[in-house]
Image (spheres, helix red, strand yellow):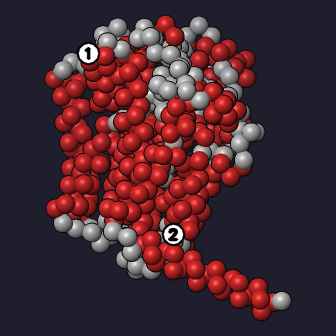
């Protein structure tokens, strides 16, 4: 019996290797096209169920800025605001319907995601990465109900996630790749990553520093990354000073400190000095600490006065450090509430946002849900409850894939894997400084799951130098 089992395992292994060999012999263009078409076909039911797409998250605010109903600022990426607005204008001009324009935008966005997945898989094929792990990652991604919901929504995280993936795929080649074509692609994808979400520039700066210190790539790559930062800086300068578009408020970056200090003030009000309380009320007046909630800093953030902070920055910084040293456990507790939803999405309080039309007062374009598959739509809605979703499709699984790959990269001291992973490590670092845990913030990591899994296996092509 033991011999028979070993024989079956051997036969299955042989068949698998032959299958991988046959698939990987396909021309890159054919392999990518077939995968692109497969993803598009698989997502048709979700597209029909969510038609014309979920006009939610910050989409209505961005369109209000685009059409001049609200003041335009760089709080939301200008490029994404105008890209989406272009389709609204196109739909109105050609069909006298903003809904059709939005539906076209959502279609284009879905095609971008499918193309990004196909491109990433094609790079994995060139690297001769394990096909079984790659296929498992692709299936996890395209079957994931949260991926389907967010792909067909107006959030900026979708296109940003695509460009983040494309940029990270080029970094995989950084240890050995060269040539004009490669540097142009790295430059373009890097710029798009930064311009479609504001934290892209911070991710790039962190990668540049670590790559330099650990010598993860050639000098030419570092020069290319510096060029991306310079070009994005020029673009932002033109937008801010040339076009007169005001900068977004910095308070979005300060959510964790304001949440921590507000919790300490609320819990230890009687113990604090008059100076400490006065400093707090300078930036969060009217007893703002009373609006503190465990899993969201939005209420505190809405009352935060950034200008007052900047006018007395040194004193506020000292106060923040002093309170942290005196009440470290409270600081940890307050931060924990903002991030624990990423590791256990059952704790996320705003998961229904993935299918919610937000800011009704700004939706003056007549965009309403008109899904063509009510049964599939109900299935997606149930998936937002997470307990109806199998554990293997839970959104937080992508973080475990990333953690496993980080262990592999550090153990092998592998440049290729480390460069790829740094993109997502630093991206997640910006996420956990945000005001609330949202599943859309996991989207860029989730669509990278095929590569996070495929890179766990050692490639036959030994171009992954050690650092």
Q: Residue at x 57, y 22 (%)?
A: 356
Under tag 2, what secondary structure?
helix
Residue named by callout 2: 131
Q: Which mark is drawn over residue 355?
A: none
The picture places residue 112, in percent across and down from the top left corner, at: 37, 43
Q: Which image quarter is the C terminus in?
A: bottom left
- Residue extending farthest to the front is 372
Depth check: 144 or 411 in front?
Answer: 144
Quarter residue 377 falls in: top right
Residue 335 to residue 428: above or below: above
The picture places residue 102, in percent across and down from the top left corner, at: 39, 23
Q: Residue at x 55, y 37 (%)?
A: 45
Q: In the picture provided, is 394 more to the left or to the right than 355?
A: right
Depth check: 340 or 26 in front?
Answer: 26
Q: Tell which circle, 2 or 1, labels the residue nearer the N-terminal end.
A: 1
Q: Which mark is drawn over residue 93?
A: 1
Q: Nearer the viewer, mark 2 or mark 1?
A: 1
Depth check: 382 or 458 in front?
Answer: 382
Q: In the picture provided, is 397 more to the left or to the right than 59?
A: right
The picture places residue 10, in percent across and down from the top left corner, at: 65, 86
Q: CA distance from mark 2 to mark 1?
A: 46 Å
- Residue extending farthest to the right is 1
Under tag 1, what secondary structure?
helix
């Amino acid at each position: 019996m033991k011999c028979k089992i070993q024989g079956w395992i051997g036969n299955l292994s042989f068949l698998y290797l032959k299958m991988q060999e046959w698939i990987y012999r396909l021309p890159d263009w054919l392999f990518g096209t077939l995968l692109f078409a497969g993803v598009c076909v698989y997502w048709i039911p979700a597209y029909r169920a969510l038609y014309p797409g979920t006009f939610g998250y910050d989409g209505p605010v961005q369109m209000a800025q685009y059409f001049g109903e609200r003041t335009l600022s760089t709080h939301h990426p200008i490029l994404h605001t105008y890209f989406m607005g272009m389709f609204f204008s196109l739909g109105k001009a050609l069909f006298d319907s903003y809904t059709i324009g939005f539906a076209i935008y959502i279609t284009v966005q879905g095609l971008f995601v499918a193309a990004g997945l196909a491109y990433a898989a094609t790079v994995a094929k060139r690297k001769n990465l394990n096909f079984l792990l790659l296929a498992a990652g692709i299936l996890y991604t395209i079957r994931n109900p949260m991926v389907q919901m967010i792909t067909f929504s107006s959030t900026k995280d979708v296109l940003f996630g695509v460009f983040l993936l494309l940029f990270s795929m080029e970094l995989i080649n950084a240890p050995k790749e060269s040539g004009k074509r490669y540097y142009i692609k790295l430059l373009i994808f890097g710029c798009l990553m930064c311009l479609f979400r504001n934290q892209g520039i911070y991710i790039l700066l962190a990668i540049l520093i670590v790559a330099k210190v650990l010598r993860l790539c050639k000098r030419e790559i570092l020069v290319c990354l510096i060029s991306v930062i310079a070009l994005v800086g020029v673009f932002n300068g033109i937008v801010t000073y040339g076009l007169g578009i005001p900068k977004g408020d910095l308070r979005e970056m300060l959510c964790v400190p304001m949440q921590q200090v507000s919790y300490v003030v609320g819990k230890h009000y009687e113990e604090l000095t008059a100076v400490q309380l006065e400093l707090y009320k300078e930036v969060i007046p009217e007893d703002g600490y009373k609006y503190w909630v465990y899993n969201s800093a939005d209420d505190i953030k809405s009352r935060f006065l950034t200008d007052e902070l900047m006018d007395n920055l040194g004193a506020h910084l000292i106060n923040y450090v002093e309170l942290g040293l005196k009440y470290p456990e409270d600081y940890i507790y307050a931060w924990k509430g903002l991030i624990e939803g990423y590791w256990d999405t059952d704790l996320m309080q705003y998961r229904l946002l993935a299918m919610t039309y937000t800011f009704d007062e700004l939706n003056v374009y007549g965009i309403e849900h008109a899904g063509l598959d009510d049964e599939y739509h109900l299935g997606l809605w149930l998936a937002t409850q997470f307990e109806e979703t199998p554990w293997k499709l839970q959104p937080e699984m992508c973080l475990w894939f990333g953690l496993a790959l980080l262990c592999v990269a550090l153990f092998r001291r592998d440049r290729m894997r480390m460069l790829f992973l740094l993109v997502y490590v630093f991206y997640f670092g910006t996420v956990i400084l945000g005001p609330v845990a949202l599943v859309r913030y996991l989207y860029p990591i989730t669509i990278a799951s095929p590569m996070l899994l495929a890179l766990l296996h050692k490639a036959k092509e030994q171009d992954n130098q050690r650092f």
